[in-house]
Amino acid sequence: MEKGNNTYNNPKRIIIAGGGTGGHIFPAIAIANALRKSDPGIELLFVGARGKMEMEKVPQAGYEIKGLNIAGFNRSSLLKNISLPFKLIKSFFQVKEIFGQFRPNAVVGVGGYSTFPVLRYAQKKGIPTFIHESNSFAGKSNILLGKHATKIFVASEAMEKFFPKGKIIITGNPVRKIISDSSVTRAEGLKFFGLDENKKTILAVGGSLGARSINEVMLAHLIDLHALNIQLIWQTGKNNSSRYIMSGKMHKSNVWVDEFIQEIDKAYAAADIVISRAGAMSVAEMCVAGKPTVFVPYPFASEDHQTENAMRLIRKDAAAMVKDSDAATKLFGVVTDILFDDEKLKKFRENVSLLAITNANEVIAEEILKSIQ
């Protein structure tokens, strides 16, 4: 295929770069699905970081992915950063090779280690680049890339302090189709997890790696679930999962526990209340699922952006929040107080549902395709 002035013969070819966490991967897949739906002949290629979860999740979704030898800055061990400049240089050579083979006519960045070298290379080559910034506080890489991006898709207002105003489009965050299209009933969800339809149910999720503070609270209060006649669906995440799973399974009459929940639509349907970190995608999912939620923001997120994500809902009386440092003493009490307050649950359900955006992936796909006609 011949190249000329960065335009290519059909089919359109688009690279989607990023990953590292489900908060980046699932929206990227949602955008890919929307692009493919709008243009069935489109060719899509993901670029991620080797050893990260995108290398597993993207092929499971039916897409090809190339991995870069790249890592982020390690704040806990400065010695581990010695090789970082070499990895970054190597990643640019890998990106050059990928572009030479695939020859994209647009590149989309969703955040994560691989976003910067891929979009930076595309911008140097004059290829249109698009950024999806899911958080209410933009990351440093995206701020740098935003100066030369074609369009920047954001989840919330007041992002002009990070990006050129004329490039910003407020789209919300793409949510997994399994959640946005779900028709699972509460009874069906509880049956799937082998739990009692007549008991109130907590869903505790801490992301793909797990949230230690949330997990420790669940572990400490397993015995209290029986006393309160309530039950728990518990996604422990990968870190220290065997310890939590072993303890949870000792209470299997009212606890379902595992490292990861594949059928998250059934878990949301079953839950009366959710305990979650406040990553941008988690917040978006709670809105679409219409779930009363107690957020426990990750305290070391850059610029404390998870607290700001949660506050967007709290200001509208659509959720509650407990600081990570207070989780051990306050979380279980706050959750159970809300769980037994039917008026509060109803108000949270109604208010959070008003904030739901279900077509962000379609809007993003339409804007990308419109820009590269």
Image (spheres, grey):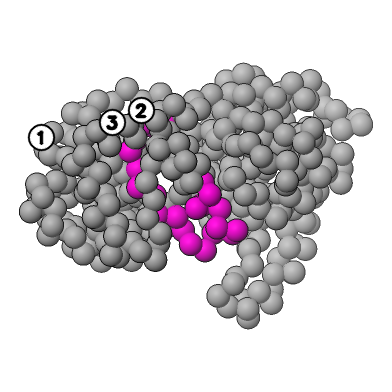
Q: How far apart are the alpha carbons under marks 1 and 2?
A: 22 Å
- Residue 261 lies in quadrant: top left
Spatial CA distance of label 1 from label 3 is 18 Å
Q: Which residue is mark 3?
A: 346
Give the structural element (helix, strand or loop) at label 1: loop
- Of all residues, the one furthest to the bottom in this rendering is 79
Q: Are marks 1 and 2 in contact (CB under 8 Å)?
A: no
Q: Residues within 10 Å of mark 3 (few under 14, many from 20)?
A: few
What amino acid is found at the position of numbered circle 2 in the picture? Glu
Question: Which quadrant would the N terminus be assigned to in this image?
Answer: top right
- 109 displayed left or right of 257: right
- For label 1, the residue is 198
Q: Amino acid at mark 3?
A: Lys
Q: Quadrant of the C terminus?
A: top right
Question: Magenta span covers which residues?
Answer: 288-309
Question: Which circle's residue, 1 or 3, is located before the other in the chain?
Answer: 1
Q: Does 344 appear in magenta?
A: no
Task: Kindly identify which residue carries mark 2.
Answer: 350
Rendered location of residue 203, percent (x, y): 28, 45
Q: Is residue 216 above or below residue 115?
A: below
